[in-house]
Amino acid sequence: MMKTPITNEKGVALILVLLMVSVMVVLTLQLNVSSRSQVHEAANLGDGIRVLYIAKSGLFAGMGLLSEDRGNADTLNEAWARTDAISEQSKDYFDGGHLELVIEDETGKVNINKLVEGNGFNNAVKGVLSRLLTQPQFKLKDREVEDLLNAIKDWIDADAEVTATGAENAYYQGLGKSYTVRNGPMESIDELLLVRGISRELYYGTSESPGLARFLTVHGEGSVNINTAPKEVLRALSPSITEDAANRMDDYRRNAANNLTEPSWYRRVSGLQNTAIDSVTVTTKSEYFQIAATGHLGTMKRSIRGFVKRDSEKKLSVVAWRLG
């Protein structure tokens, strides 16, 4: 006699209900996690836009400062060169955020493209760069400096001839990640990172020493603004300008009572009466400036770097800019 299986319809129904509830709970949790993720992503996107516009506002503020400058000479005593107060006050204008703004005078730097004249060295600019690179903070030997200048010249000059210990295409094409030498003027000072011998530490600097990028530019006709040049550049302008002399020059030009309209003012500095700066042309007026603006919001930050040219009527045009 065959036995009929015992079934418990109530038990089966309970199991099905529990399974359905479990599935619903899982789906609900997944939906909750997904919703939270989307909300978080949306918040990050919104904050990203806000912090970008904080940085952009800094770029426009910097341009405003430069266009409002009405002095007969560009100096480190002007509002565009003293932006710490703006950075501090920005905390009152941006809810939970703030702005960092730095404006540098590109005319106060040495134009690296002027190292080459025709297909040879511009010996005056080479002398300035040699004195700059042999300063103690760069920790370079004389031979290393010569090698660097040869490699930079070969990067810029139009020919394919290797200058002594320089480097042309044969070297760069043989690298693991090969590239072609420009054989023309640099379009950005960052190109130096492609040149043989220019390390990131030398270019960007370290916690102990400044980077070479602070003292070089690709903008302008080659004149150096003696009013705004970093002290390292001041020292490089003449063999007779020592570190102590550069410090005295810096003290003199930061005194707002002193007249800095003529580039020969340095002869009024103690001990420099007979000093001659004849390697490059020095000036007291500037055309090109770099504006670096960084927006901060919580842990997020975005940066914009812009290069602007200012004409004789104080009108500005953007030469180049980039994010990051």
Image (cartoon, rainbow, N blue to C red):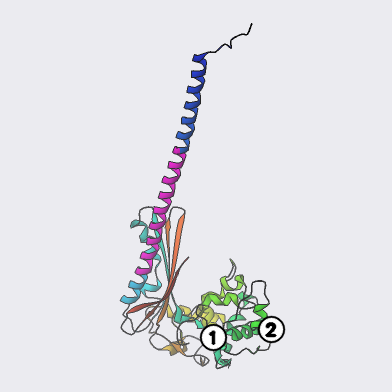
Q: Find the distance from the CA under tag 1 to the CA under tag 2.
A: 25 Å
Q: Residue most toward the front?
A: 1
In front here: 180 or 286?
180
Residue located at (68% from left, 85% from top): 165
Per the image, the residue denoted by label 1 is 184
Q: What's the magenta region?
A: 31-60
Which label number is shown at residue 304? Answer: none
Between discs 1 and 2, the one toward the N terminus: 2
| Amino acid type at image mark 1 | Gly
* Quadrant in which residue 212 is drawn: bottom right
179 vs 247, left or right, is right
Residue that label 2 marks: 143
Is 182 inside the magenta-drawn segment?
no
Say which quadrant the N terminus sits in.
top right
Q: Residue furthest top?
A: 1
Check disc 2: other Cα within 10 Å, few if <14, some if 14-19, many if 20+.
few
- Residue 130 appears in view: no
The answer to whether mark 1 and mark 2 are in CB contact below 8 A is: no
Nearer to us of marks 1 and 2 is 1
